[in-house]
Image: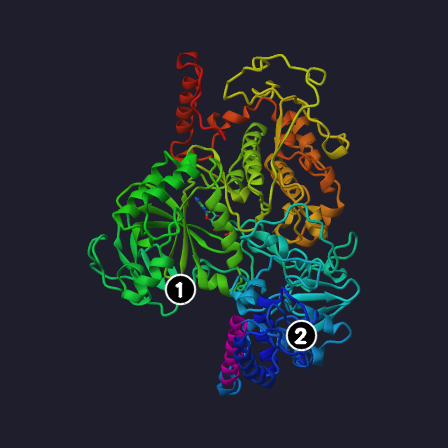
Amino acid sequence: MSSRYGICEIVELEDEFKSSDRVIDKGKKPQGSNHIVDDINKLFEAINVRTSYHGLTPLSGGTTPRRNPSKRPMRMSTSSSYSANGYSEPVSLKQALRGLCISQASEMAALKRLSKPPGSPALSEFGKIANSYKSDNSSTFVGQVKEVKVLIPEENTSMAASSRTMPEYLQGGPKMKSSYNNSPQSSVQFNKKEKSPKRVGTGIRLNEILYEPESGNVLPMIESALHEKKCVAYDEPSKPVVNGSKHKPAKSVNKASFNLRRKGRLQSMPSSTFISSNKLGKPIKPIKTVSRNKNIVKKKSKQDLPSATSVIENVTFVPDTCQLVCERCHCALKEPNLPPCNSISTEVKHGFSQRGCGSNGSVIYNNTNFKYGDKSDFTQSSNSSSICEYSSSTSISEESSRCSIGNRPHMSMDSRRTAIHDMMKRNNGFLGLRHFNLLKKLGCGDIGTVYLAELVGTNLRYAIKVMDNEFLERRKKMPRAHTEREILRILDHPFLPTLYAHFVSDNLSCLVMDYCPGGDLHVLRQKQPGRYYHEQAARFYVAEVLISLEYLHMLGIVYRDLKPENILVQQDGHIKLTDFDLSLRCSSNPTILQSLSSGAMEPPRMSGPCAGSNCIDPFCIKPTCQMSCFSPRILPTCKGKKTKPGPMTHHVSLPQLVAEPTEARSNSFVGTHEYLAPEIIKGDGHGSAVDWWTFGIFLYELLYGRSPFKGTGNDETLANVVLQSLNFPDTPLVSFQARDLINGLLVKEPENRLGSQKGAAEIKQHPFFSGINWALIRCTIPPELPGESDIGMAKSASMEKATKCVDYNGPAAGGHPEFELF
Ligand SMILES: Nc1ncnc2c1ncn2[C@@H]1O[C@H](COP(=O)(O)OP(=O)(O)OP(=O)(O)O)[C@@H](O)[C@H]1O
């Protein structure tokens, strides 16, 4: 063992001399007549004795024994090949001394190792794991077992180097893996815990490795979800995904398996729990029944449907008493007669104290850990417990402030953002739950609970999503929370949520976002006469959703969970698309497409008030107004593909931005039954086109009051999605344009689906959207909401805004619109 290490050390050090590869003849006498040489030679002899003793490679001036090319650091080698090589040629004094030092160092290292108690770690963690696999392989693996050994990186000699090439989660990284390589030598995922790999089908299963003997591929996989293993590479939340990768999965990969989710959303799960095959026409196993609508029906097993209290496991909000109650010991996290918020309170159990009720029955909570705890608490918390999104540091600096404004131009005038900033400044950069009065619970999702909150000392309201990190860890939902947070951090769009701050209080992760008082489109639809939206209203909502999706795609985000429940209505009646925990992050490559020619392909212009290309009427969303304010022109055919017949599209001549990550691919089974695209159900791999499928279902549901493929159960729904052709009911009456658009979107083959080639730009040109002023859509008057009083002054606010817009655009204003375009 020690000699092996000796060799390893020498091999490393030997590299310093590897410029020469002459083999030294041990029998030769040193050349030269200098009397110093004799002294040196004596020294050499001494060195030689030492190095021979340890079986080490001797050194010589400017020469070195030829290293066996098969020898690599971290591998066992036979010392004989080295020790057999002696030397007799002279070396420089420097080299001789260095050689002496080397041998002494190796001696010391050997002694040190021998002095260690048995069982003490002598290998790096990577080495240990590699060894354990090696030993396991010998007992468990058959056939290609030896191949697994090549997973040990050969080029790295030091522990640091090993660590660099180790799978991420061997270094404490997240569990979901991002590497997907065809080579068994590269980035293969080990699972530390499971050391007894088993055969699965044609492959050898290593819990998270699938070795495929036929192809020689080693594939990462998830223990319980074969279906997932070819897609984990694309779904890791924090890492962009390689665009356009065309990975070929292992044969045994192709098993559809997914999980039912709250609200009927799906997530990967063992195949046996849901579907027996992803092949078309094969029987589908029964699945758990879950209602899509979390607000109306909540049929779920206890385990699957965590209550608000289980989502935030340690803490429950009790509205009557304005208390947070600890779930572990049922104590009320409340201190009576607390001093004012800005004074120091004593630290209470769990580091989480209620500071008293606000004027409106609200409560103010303290996370005393990070602020008032002892030094160690403070130190730890200053790094983790109160982290603002604006900066990685705990204190807010002018620089980070400027940076934030620079990155989010739409937020620069936002009073909520300013107020948060001011609050942080006053609190040395800290922000915590104690700075908010929690007013009521708005809803409970799969990974957290959302509260309406008011910033202390202001009348500004926010929605705070509170997630229990412990719960997320235990339920393996941390990646989803991470995905959502990371996406929220980069959004800067009026129809998408603004993340004002993110902080962690007592292991509760809190996202501070803008509050949408209008409810969601699903609930609002129930309040519509006939439970469906009038076409004009539907057009408004889908147009805003389309813009949101386009923006997300530009950022390389495939949303994947479009449905009315996830579309909230803001105070001014415009939408906010929320809920990004199932989104897929990938790379996108926005491209400007030039027109082939203008004139010849100019679309026929319709007569009417908006026919002119210089129309700036922000309200021109009337179907009679056929032309957009920014004249559309024709696009060249993409990548030689034929423009498919089917949905009507306007031809445009202006250069066009195509920003869709059309090449992105994922195999996750995520979404909501009624909204799942066929390619997701079939496990064929999916990309941004799934968002256009869900967009079609969404429009259908708004117009008809139900989704097109809904069956009596979820399994029937899924079968319908894949097999059933699209039908339109006779009532309500829906325009041809709308039906044509839906027809184009609900094409089962994603490559033929409207939007699959040029993304949102393609869809925007559909006659259903004719007359919409896309750039100024924020200034259009939103549809009237049922029970407008709930929404406050939504309509008047929008009217006011719209009037402003018109004023700004009027000739008197110099013709320069002052809108924030997006
Ligand atoms: N910004 C907001 N303003 C108003 N209500 C909100 C806001 N965000 C969320 N809600 C409400 O809180 C509920 C829970 O939201 P949340 O996003 O946590 O759950 P979800 O939509 O079920 O998503 P997930 O399960 O993926 O977490 C929503 O259904 C919505 O009604």
Circle 1 packing at 10 Å, graded few (<14), some (14-19), many (20+), is many
Q: Within the magenta stretch, is there residue 109?
A: yes
Looking at the picture, how far across and down is residue 118, in whole percent? 52, 87
Circle 2 packing at 10 Å, graded few (<14), some (14-19), many (20+), is many
* Direction from residue 328 to residue 304 in the image, left or right: right
* Direction from residue 544 to residue 632 in the image, left or right: right
Q: Answer whether residue 195 is visible to the viewer in this image.
A: no
- Foreground mark, 2 or 1, reads 2
Looking at the picture, how far across and down is residue 438, in whole percent? 34, 51
Q: Answer whether residue 631 is visible to the viewer in this image.
A: yes
Q: Within the magenta stretch, is there residue 594?
A: no
Taking the spot 45% from the left edge, 28% from the top edge, the residue there is 820
Tag 2: amino acid: Ile
- The front one of 397 and 67 is 67
Residue 96, image quadrant: bottom right
What distance separates the C-alpha of mark 2 from that of mark 1? 71 Å
User: What is the number of the mark on residue 812?
Assistant: none
Q: Contact (CB < 8 A) between labels 2 and 1?
A: no
Looking at the picture, how far across and down is residue 663, in whole percent? 67, 43
Q: Mark 2 highlights which residue? A: 24
- The front one of 767 and 410 is 410
Tag 1: amino acid: Asn
Q: Mark 1 highlights which residue? A: 314
For the N terminus, the quadrant is bottom right
Rendered position, 415 above or below 478: above
* Direction from residue 319 to residue 8 in the image, left or right: right
Stretch in magenta: 93-111
Looking at the picture, how far across and down is residue 598, in whole percent? 68, 18
Per the image, label 1 sits on a secondary structure element best described as: loop
Taking the spot 32% from the left edge, 62% from the top edge, the residue there is 379
Rendered position, 443 above or below 802: below
- The front one of 507 and 678 is 507
